Every structure is written in structure tokens, then in C-alpha cells.
Amino acid sequence: MYLLIPAAGVGKRMGSNRNKLFLEVQSKPIIAWTLLAAEAASSISWIGIISQPSDWPDFKNIIADLSLAKPVEFIIGGSTRQESVYNGLQALPPEAEQVLIHDGARCLATPNLLNACAAAIRHCAGLIAAIPVKDTIKIVDETGIIQSTPDRQYLWAAQTPQGFNVQLLKQCHAEGIRQGWEVTDDAALFERCGIEVRIVPGEETNLKVTTPQDLAIAEFIISHRGG
Ligand SMILES: Nc1ccn([C@@H]2O[C@H](COP(=O)(O)OP(=O)(O)OP(=O)(O)O)[C@@H](O)[C@H]2O)c(=O)n1
Ligand SMILES: C[C@](O)(CO)[C@H](O)COP(=O)(O)O
């Protein structure tokens, strides 16, 4: 299975002065944990890391330190996640029929989750890892007044990995460009094009390291993992 890792962000919400993926959790950069999960997932045979060329020397040093057995290709990142994934799709080898996309910032996803998504995408056009929402969610207007409370049984928190048929995802990205759609995940492009996206049970611990609080939580989770 081909795996694209969007890793070209800047980490605004982390308040970091450079790509947050170089921040350390348990003495390893965030991206190193993500790459180690990909290395340990038996289904993954090819890794594309989508990132800004100015970060490539640091990524290359990290990869060398990890002595990964799997090939890692470097792909130039865009100015949004959506653009970065678009670039990643163009860089896939022509024989790639399905792809998993997994945020570099979701460094706690387990190899099992990557393998489960890789197995499931053989049987559908699109899927995402997701977990049921625990909070009561409110739709609020711009003045801060609640407009409605959606029924929680239909609410799921989207994670990555997200898996897709490559041809269809390329078509959906192209349609997104034509229509000027701005989305925060690839499933949203499938949805807007009217193509079904299936849910695969995600992991409660598979948080996206977005804020300094997430970094502390990631530190706690990794330090309490066995092995
Ligand atoms: N232009 C971008 C922006 C984001 N990403 C990647 O998409 C994932 C999810 O993005 P997010 O957590 O929002 O990362 P940042 O964009 O770095 O954070 P922020 O939005 O706080 O600036 C991350 O692995 C990030 O590196 C990317 O590849 N290209
Ligand atoms: C793809 C994603 O991780 C699913 O939760 C998320 O949508 C990325 O969005 P962000 O706005 O870049 O954090």
C-alpha cells in the first residue's frame, strides 16, 4: 500500500516558530513516531513525505537515524493541506491504485490502524478512520448564539488514515480546484462529488498534535505504551 504523509505545515496553533513535526515527544521528533508506525505496518510498502524543501535536510537526518527499511520519497508541499495532498497524488507511481493519506501530526496512530485501513480500502472507494463524538456539539452563529444541537448519534470525529481509490481522488481534487472548494480533509472532496466514504473505527489515542496541550497528552500516551 502507498502511504502519503502530509508534513508541510507550519504549526501556527502550536505557536511554534517552525514545523511542529520536529518538536520532540519522548526524545523523538513527532514525525519520527509517525514514520515508525508506517515502518511497523506490514501493509505499507511505499512512503511519500510531503514537505517544504527547506525542511528536507532535517527530515533526511531523522530518516537516516531511524534506519527505515521502506523507501521514502520526498514531495514538495503546498500552502494548504489540500494542496499538499494534491501534489502527493501527482507524485504517486503510476501503478498505485489505492492510497492511504495519514497526517504527519497524527503520530500516535498504531500500525494496526494503518493495516486495518489498508485492508479495508481494497473493498471500497473511500474511507476514513473516525471515532464517535463524546461531547454535545452546538452549531453557533457569528454572534455567539446557539442555532441548533445536532443529534450526536450521527457525529463522528474524523481522523487519518484516510484511504482512497487513486483515480477517483485525483478526479475529486481536480473538481475541487475547478469549483474553488477549500476543505480540511480528502473525504470532504469525495462527499462533495457524491462518492460514498466509509468509516473505519479509529483510535481514541490517535489525536492530531495541534496545540501545546496535545504535545503534553502525546508525551503521556507514548510514555505509558508498552514495548
Ligand atoms: N500546507 C500544509 C499544511 C498542513 N500540512 C500537514 O497536514 C497535517 C494536518 O495539519 P495541521 O495539524 O493543521 O498542521 P499545521 O498546518 O502545521 O498546523 P496549523 O494549522 O496550526 O498551522 C499536518 O501533518 C501538516 O504538516 C501539509 O502537509 N501542508
Ligand atoms: C485530516 C484531519 O486530520 C482529520 O481530522 C484534519 O481535518 C486536518 O485538518 P487541519 O485543519 O489541517 O487540522
Image: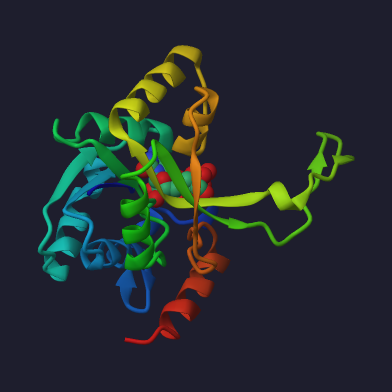
Query: Height in image: 93 above or below 36?
Result: above
Which residue is at the front of the view, 55 or 159? 159
Residue 215 locus on image (x, y percent): 49, 68
Q: Is residue 68 left or right of residue 182?
A: left
Residue shown at the point (44%, 44%) measured from the top left: 127
Query: Height in image: 146 above or below 17?
Result: above
Whether residue 80 is visible: no
> Quadrant location of residue 28?
bottom left
Query: Height in image: 210 above or below 3?
Result: below
Which residue is at the front of the view, 52 or 50? 50
Residue 162 locus on image (x, y percent): 41, 46
Q: Is residue 55 left or right of residue 6?
A: left
Residue ranking furthest to the top: 178
Query: Height in image: 25 above or below 95?
Result: below
Residue shown at the point (15%, 46%) measured from the top left: 73
Q: Is residue 91 left or right of residue 106?
A: left
Whether residue 76 is visible: yes
Residue 106 locus on image (x, y percent): 42, 59
Residue 147 locus on image (x, y percent): 87, 37
- What colouring style does the render use? rainbow
Considering the image in quadrants, where does the C terminus appear?
A: bottom left
Which residue is at the front of the view, 82 or 2? 2
Residue shown at the point (19%, 33%) measured from the top left: 91
**Total label count?**
0
